[in-house]
Amino acid sequence: MSTAPVTLPDRLAEFQSAYDELKARGLRLDLTRGKPAADQLALSDALLTLPGAGSYTDAAGTDLRNYGGASGLPELRALFSDALRVPVPQLLALGNSSLTLMHDVLAFAMLHGVPGSERPWGREETVSFLCPVPGYDRHFAITEALGVRMIPVPLNDDGPDIAAVKAALELDPTIKGIWCVPVYSNPTGAVYSEEVARELVSLTAGDDFRIMWDNAYAVHHITDWRPEPIDVLRLAAEAGNPDRVFVFASTSKVTYAGAGVGFLGSSPDNIAWFSHWASFQSIGPDKLNQLRHVELLQSPEGVAAHMEKHRALIAPKFAAVQEVFGRRLAPFGVGSWTDPKGGYFVTLTVSPGVAKRAIALAAEAGIAITPAGSTHPYLDDPEDAVIRIAPTFPTIDDLNAGLEGFCTALLLAEAEKASA
Ligand code: PLP
């Protein structure tokens, strides 16, 4: 005689009492932040004493303590040029944040238009952007803050869903751009294929359509696999759309998240355009910070070696996510989750309508998880199903405790839904 399988509703009482016990423990754990942990920051602590007394000139002998050098230190640009596939003359090294550069590019576009614009974007009745989802909340926050209407399109494992992108562009002439994180995307870990990149740069769109190619995690591997860097500027030029792409990156998660260097790469015309409008804002970036970065990292191989040290610290944390979810959730068929090969996040997809409830239950038990909806424009995940897990910042013990507790909360939320 066969016995009926034990279903989630059968477990409701068991999950409820496990949750009550969890709550009684009074934990205070935080899995919300995609930040490097202190041990990762310590890898770059030589920056605190670099460039050192008497060291303030670049290879050409320029005094870096002074104004000038608006494009940034050539040696540092050379150091990241290959990884980002941007020729040095088209790669600017600027302030401490790439988000600032993304904001400025879009703010300049709103105020002045970009090469190819008929008028400033801000004088259009409506400006819209395609937002692959799940995506990065701070991208969506920039477009929202500047009054750009956001249109979600699905993100597949190899990049944005091109059929959906094409359909949106055909319907809507107000679309001026798309957000992209081509390598280890935030938050799914998707890595774009060259084919998808080629499709994106070849799309039929206005002359001022722009791809915001945020290559934040280009060198942030946590396995032996190395995606072949995509030369998106060359692909765009070959497709006859040389000005279509802005490339962004930074050393925020290479060296110090608060005191790194941001990069902007693009076509010669776009770089001239950006440099012109940026010249009203600054007489040059912090070149001494750039010099100390050159002294710390030294070469592309030095960057790769430094990133291996990060990998040694964070790969066990990503492995812990897989282990705990596999052990706690898989037996009940609850959730599906990504297994990224780099970057900073894991995406967990739960049953529709369960994400907010699971996160609220976790919060009541003292475990903070990134709010449901953060992965979508306007913080609105219509399915209420996507949860972003950020494993790097807590200690491995806190991470394990947080993941276990979160699974307890999620199992209860799923059982509640299945019983309703
Ligand atoms: N871009 C992506 C995709 C990110 O995930 C993050 C940080 O989490 C950033 C940019 C932040 O970049 P920055 O520190 O250079 O402003």
Image (cartoon, helix red, strand yellow):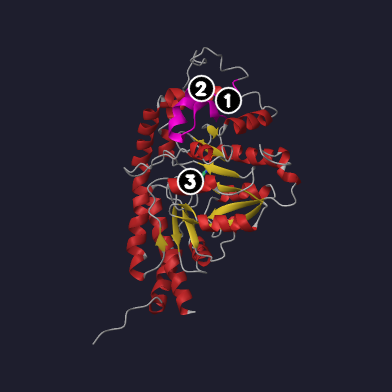
From which residue to which does the magenta span run? Answer: 69-95
Element marked by disc 3: helix
Element marked by disc 2: helix
User: What label does residue 71 carry, if any?
Assistant: 1
Amino acid at pointer 1: Ser
Question: Which is nearer the eye, 90 or 61?
Answer: 90
The residue carrying pointer 3 sits among few (fewer than 14), some (14 to 19) or many (20 or more) residues within 10 Å by Cα, namely: many
Q: Which mark's residue is nearer the viewer, 3 or 2?
A: 3
Residue at mark 3 to residue at mark 2: CA–CA distance: 28 Å
Q: Does the magenta stretch include residue 278?
A: no
Q: Position of residue 54 (x, y in %)?
A: 50, 12
Q: Position of residue 269 (x, y in %)?
A: 61, 31
Are circles 1 and 2 on residues that touch, CB within 8 Å? yes
Please indicate, yes or no, whether residue 83 appears anywhere in the rendered image.
Answer: yes
Q: Name the residue under label 3.
A: 197
The residue carrying pointer 2 sits among few (fewer than 14), some (14 to 19) or many (20 or more) residues within 10 Å by Cα, namely: many
Q: Does the magenta stretch include residue 92?
A: yes
User: What label does residue 74 carry, if any?
Assistant: 2
Amino acid at pointer 2: Pro
Question: Which residue shows up at 70% across the image and 42% down it?
Answer: 110
Q: Where is residue 172 in the image (x, y as percent from the top left)?
A: 65, 56
Element marked by disc 1: loop
Amino acid at pointer 3: Ala
Residue at mark 1 to residue at mark 2: CA–CA distance: 8 Å
The residue carrying pointer 1 sits among few (fewer than 14), some (14 to 19) or many (20 or more) residues within 10 Å by Cα, namely: many
Question: Which residue shows up at 49% across the image and 29% down it?
Answer: 87
